Amino acid sequence: MDWFTAPGYWLSRLVFQRALAGVYLVAFLTAALQFRALLGERGMLPVPRFVARVPFRRAPSLFHWRYSDRLFAACSWTGCAVSAALLAGVDGYLPLGAAMALWLVPWALYLSIVNVGQTWYGFGWESLLLETGFLAVFLGNDEVAPPVVVLFLLRWLLFRVEFGAGLIKMRGDACWRNLTCLHHHHETQPMPGPLSWYFHHLPGPLHKVEVAANHLTQLVVPFLLFTPQPVATAAAALMVLTQLWLVLSGNFAWLNWITIVLAVPALRLPYDTPSVPGAPLWYEVVVLVVAALLLFLSYRPVVNMLSRRQVMNRSFDPLHLVNTYGAFGSVSRVRHEIVVEGTLDEVPREDGDWRAYEFRGKPGDPRRWPRQFAPYHLRLDWMMWFAALSPGYAGTWFAALVERLLENDPATLRLLRRSPFPPDRPPRHVRARLFRYRYTTWRELRETGACWERTYVREYLPPTRLTAPVREP
């Protein structure tokens, strides 16, 4: 079928596949390095406890068959190895069917992780990676030109990501409509980056220009993805530039990067396309059947997107094949941070020797400048931001975190930047206090060298020790 393939997108497919493999690699590496403390047998939210109460049909995962920390590690590191192989282009040397099977491996492995990941994997970019990764299975390799219907589905996914995010903003916080959200966002976002302080101090009128440009990119430009070239390329390029701006202004794991990856197939990149034989019939049939299924499954995400009660980041099927997306429907005006402290004192006193734990990404010491971690995902740091918004987000994992700190648990301490206690002397008590953080002014930065100024708000968790039950905050 001459209409089935689009040879002119050969290079676009190549760049897309290699970039997607890179995102997969980061995702699996994040899982491999953090799972023991978060989801392991002695983790804060253990997988065995989850699979015992949630049936396979609701959360398909190989860990329903069996769970051990060794198996989870094997799954994560296998995902790293396969992702690295795809990044190196191994799929280009395989027969078409084998290449498709190879792309299916990281999708199936990551699905197994996400479906048992609970709170730690409740972010929209997890489903976005799975939906993108599933489409990549059917994009083909060097034996065939890129299928038109898969290229269309990738644009359809990018459209839903951007347009859904734009709608949730316009329906949500009034500051998006009066163009003032970025007066607060750079200061109150989950994990600021090294340039976020400077973005926050941009002039107010420029912040309004940023918001207006965001609305244009998310509410108007997505429709241009379905127009003829070169308009579609210009639309995708504008989305890439917007995402790079977000990369500079904060740490949003791989959300911005996977969105950039999604824009690549819409770019018509100049390239001398090699001549290849037509796609085999079995491949055409498989691609068309899958495309029909995905379009059918798009019904509920579209209804949600058009609804006044639109919800963000929702999966409508346990395989995460077609999902709904969105971010920052509301923007916090004030930043609160939980400061976790421990003491060796036998009797805890308010003025005792309390020592603070330092996290890798979330603000703590006011003089410590934020680092760049994205696309790597610091899951505990992100959830600490949510827990500071409301104790309801802390659930049972926060009590488990305190218990692990009282034990000097090595896996948990590896998630932190610094523990104030030596390995052989765990704290006798741990407490948590809530502070209000704000960026310093230019003058305060010059005088104190601190990028943050903080004010005590209230006790978040009273002094707790192992001999007593750890109460939830």
Image: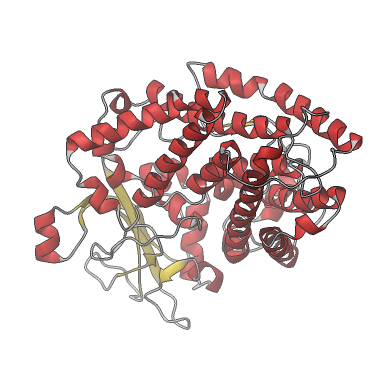
| Between 64 and 459, the one nearer to me in the picture | 64
Residue 438, image x, y percentages: 22, 50
Q: Is residue 226 left or right of residue 454?
A: right
Q: Residue at x 46, y 27 (%)?
A: 221
Is the residue 217 above or below the residue 302 in the image?
Answer: below
Is the residue 179 above or below the residue 17 in the image?
Answer: above
Q: How many marks?
A: 0
Quadrant assignment, res 452: bottom left
Residue 261, image x, y percentages: 56, 45
Q: Residue at x 34, y 49 (%)?
A: 249
| Between 64 and 421, the one nearer to me in the picture | 64
Q: Is residue 93 left or right of residue 406?
A: right
Residue 459 in sight here: yes
Q: Which colour assignment does the render follow?
A: secondary structure
Q: Is residue 426 left or right of residue 437?
A: right
Q: Residue at x 81, y 44 (%)?
A: 276
| Between 329 and 233, the one nearer to me in the picture | 233
Is the residue 300 above or below the residue 276 in the image?
Answer: above
Q: Residue at x 74, y 47 (%)?
A: 274
Q: Quadrant of the N terminus?
A: top right
Residue 222, image x, y percentages: 50, 27
Residue 191 in sight here: no
Quadrant assignment, res 314: top right
Residue 279, image x, y percentages: 84, 38
Q: Is residue 82 left or right of residue 416?
A: right
| Between 138 and 109, the one nearer to me in the picture | 138
